[in-house]
Amino acid sequence: MRRILLLVAVVTACGGGLEPEPICARTLVGLCGTVRFRGAVPANTENVFIAAYLMFPQTCTDLINNRRPVIPGSVPFTDSVAAYSVPLSPGTYEWVLAVWKKPGTLTLTPADTQYLRVAGYYRSPADSTQRGSVAVPSGAAAGDIDFVVNFDSLRPATDFVTCAP
């Protein structure tokens, strides 16, 4: 009986310390989920990050100026799957994507497209051939926004938007 009481006391004192860390922090307003990686990581990979757009960008200027967050974080890409979370303002985001970056300094101008490639994006659960939109509620996170990055199929921005020369 003492051992059971001791075990209960120890588990209670841990306060959930042995539970896995949730992907979506309780205080996060934004989105979170997992990214699964496929293909060989290019040798010149500097970063992989998650970006979101309230409206699907129409031009390279939109692609750079309307990206949220403006200065993105990084998603670890050394394993086959990684958890991510991105703080965002509440709203419905029409495009959520993973961006691959090669070495180079970003200037927050359309010239940045020379360093960036679309590596994968969130797809509609109802039709995986279409991009999916994500609603970020006020005061909470949109969770389970999972998608795949394919390093063997990195695509330039011009596959999605018009970029003037």
Image (tube, helix red, strand yellow):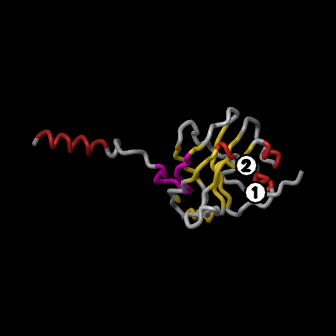
The residue under label 1 is: 160
Side of 102 relative to 149 (left or right): right
**CB under 8 Å between callouts 1 and 2?**
yes
Which image quarter: residue 74?
top right
Amino acid type, residue under disc 2 in the picture: Arg
Residue beneath the point at 44% across and 49% down: 22
Q: Can you identify the residue that label 2 sits on?
A: 155
Could you say which is closer to the camera, residue 99 or residue 27? Answer: 99
Q: How much space separates mark 1 and mark 2, taking CA atoms?
A: 9 Å
Determine whether the residue tagged by mark 1 lies in a helix, strand or loop. loop
Q: Secondary structure at mark 2?
A: loop
Q: Find the residue positioned furthest to the left.
A: 1
Q: Residue furthest top?
A: 43
Quarter of the rendering containing residue 61: bottom right
Residue 114 vs residue 19, the one in the foreground:
114
Q: Around disc 2, counting alpha carbons within 10 Å, would you say few (fewer than 14), some (14 to 19), or many (20 or more)? A: some
Looking at the image, is 89 positioned above or below residue 42?
Answer: below
Question: Label 1 is placed on what type of residue?
Answer: Phe
Quadrant of the drawing holding the N terminus: top left
Can you give x and y, in whole percent of width and height, for residue 36 in the image?
55, 47
Residue 138 placement (x, y as % from top left): 54, 64
Of the pair 163 and 61, the residue shown nearer to us: 163
